[in-house]
Image: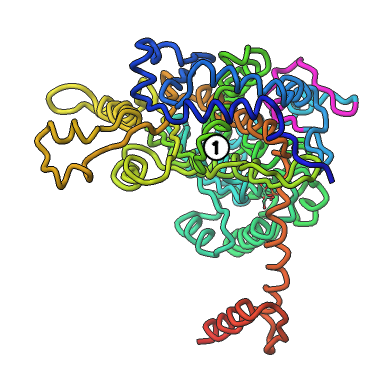
Amino acid sequence: MSEPRLTRLPQWQALQRHAGTIGHKHLRELFAADPHRGEQLVAEEVGLYLDYSKQRVDADTLHLLRELAAACQLPQRIAAMFRGERINTTENRAVLHVALRAPAGEKILVDGHDVVADVHAVLDRMAAFADRVRSGAWLGHDGRRIRNVVSIGIGGSDLGPVMAYEALRAYSRRDMAFRFVSNVDGTDFAEAVRDLDAAETLFIVCSKTFTTLETLANAHAARAWSVAALGDERAVAKHFVAVSTNAAEVAKFGIDTANMFGFWDWVGGRYSMDSAIGLSTMLAIGPEHFRAMLAGFHAMDEHFRHAPFERNLPVLMGLLAVWNNNFLDAASVAVLPYEQYLKRFPAYLQQLTMESNGKRVTLDGAAVDYATGPIYWGEPGTNGQHSFYQLLHQGTRIVPCDFIGFGQSLNPLPVQGGGDQHDLLMANLIAQGEALAFGKTAKEVRAAGTDAALAPHRTFPGNRPSSTLLAPKLTPHALGTLIALYEHSVFVQGVIWDIDSFDQWGVELGKQLAKTTIAELTAPDEPTLAHDSSTNTLIRRYRQLRES
Ligand code: F6P
């Protein structure tokens, strides 16, 4: 087995030496040394403004990071992805979510076959179906129009659709209800349908493999609920559609494959929200807005593919993430959207980032001797300010933050005395970055009249890195660019760490063990257990509790 080479690269070692000097410099010093820093360490591309001046970097850091990217063959790896090479080596698959948003007429070949034409054929079918449902032409089993859409899926077949629906709610059909069921906990399904009329409810069963335990359990529950209410098995044809790569399993479940929207093995689950997995999004916002979202994704794809690294947003964000993770030892990243509609964006990013880069071996299978994917988490501002920001400002851990905000609100709300609540929101976003970077020294605290004993408690160390992303307004197009930005930033990080960002073997063991455990929990007679003593006892205890 080969050794990981990253930490032996001269470019990595140069960054380590450099971290020894700049790592000790305070952001206060960096800003004092260059009065124009806040105007220079910024990039504005495809409608997104990125301010990274509050990252603990200088021109040398950025230069060295770009050298590292070159040594890790980032330009070649980007080109290989866009060419449709099988860069997901452990699954021997191409990685072509970029083809999902390529304009009609563009050609991307997989094994000599143009996949862009296939993408547009599915998009056109989705649009025709969405138009029929939205206009009332698609009727339920007893002739009533569809007013409720319940999307069933989990992981990449759920988090993207939920996030996009919440993000683009302002553009959605308000006379239709959209619900999402993911958890195998029956509560999720029960609460989603409890006030719905089955005659007006369409289920979209989303599963790339169509073998996922949670999704199939919920889909069976939905079919039983629908058939019981409508009194006819034939109702399934009008109330169920599927999104999958697996036509055989869809047919086995009982959904006519004429009502199936396909995608392909070169689309990873967590990269699939702009494929047919986004059917609920299209039903909610309509085909035109959906295509505008795809155009946003594509604009960022083109930027990522062609822009020089100095102003390439995903490259900058990816390299800064590596810098913070590996050279400043920051183990997590907080994503803080100051936009209520993006409330599920951090949850979406958790799968995108951690299922992609939570890996411990290189592409060659060697154990890494450096940290890989950081922990992503977050909440919308200003809510987070009243909970975990205490740790961000004064805790012992450094948590780099991504602030996300917009120039205009989709729901302006005047404040008595002038201004809009949006100004209050954005003032908070801007103030938080400033407070994290510059803090408040003990001297400043004492000068403000604070008692000496209390001064340490009221001192803010500052020097806490953050980036700020701004866009004019949360539109479908802007959402597309934002998601593609993070997708490609994750790719950049994975290339530097020399890992496969597109497989997810780490989710398998728990799934396998659960299969045995299910049989043991439900066996009529006390089963013979051969686990460790903790697992054995938990199984026995659960069996007792379920009978109590
Ligand atoms: O368990 C993880 C996972 O495989 C994810 O990668 C995927 O997004 C999710 O399960 C759902 O898979 P499917 O779409 O095949 O049901």
Looking at the image, which is closer to me, 425 or 417? 425
Q: Is the residue 504 above or below the residue 166 in the image?
A: below
Q: Dividing the picture into quarters, in which one does residue 486 lie?
A: top right
User: Which residue is depicted at the point 56% across and 22% down?
Assistant: 316
| Residue 290 visible at all | no
- Image position, residue 248 (x, y; %): 83, 50
Magenta highlight on residue 109: yes
* Left or right: 21 in relation to 122: left
Looking at the image, which is closer to me, 209 or 50? 50
Q: Is the residue 190 above or below the residue 43 in the image?
A: below
User: Which residue is depicted at the point 73% across and 51% down?
Assistant: 505
Q: Which residue is mark 1?
A: 325
Amino acid carrying label 1: it is Asn
* Left or right: 393 in relation to 191: left
- Image position, residue 7 (x, y; %): 68, 35
User: Which residue is depicted at the point 60% across and 47% down?
Assistant: 140
Magenta highlight on residue 13: no
Q: Is the residue 354 above or below the residue 299 in the image?
A: below
Magenta region? 95-111
Mark 1: which secondary structure?
A: helix
Q: Dividing the picture into quarters, in which one does residue 125 lie?
A: top right
User: Which residue is depicted at the point 63% across and 63% down?
Assistant: 224
Given the current orientation, which residue lies at the most extreme bottom position?
Answer: 525
User: Colour scheme in the image?
Assistant: rainbow
| Residue 496 visible at all | yes
- Image position, residue 222 (x, y; %): 61, 58
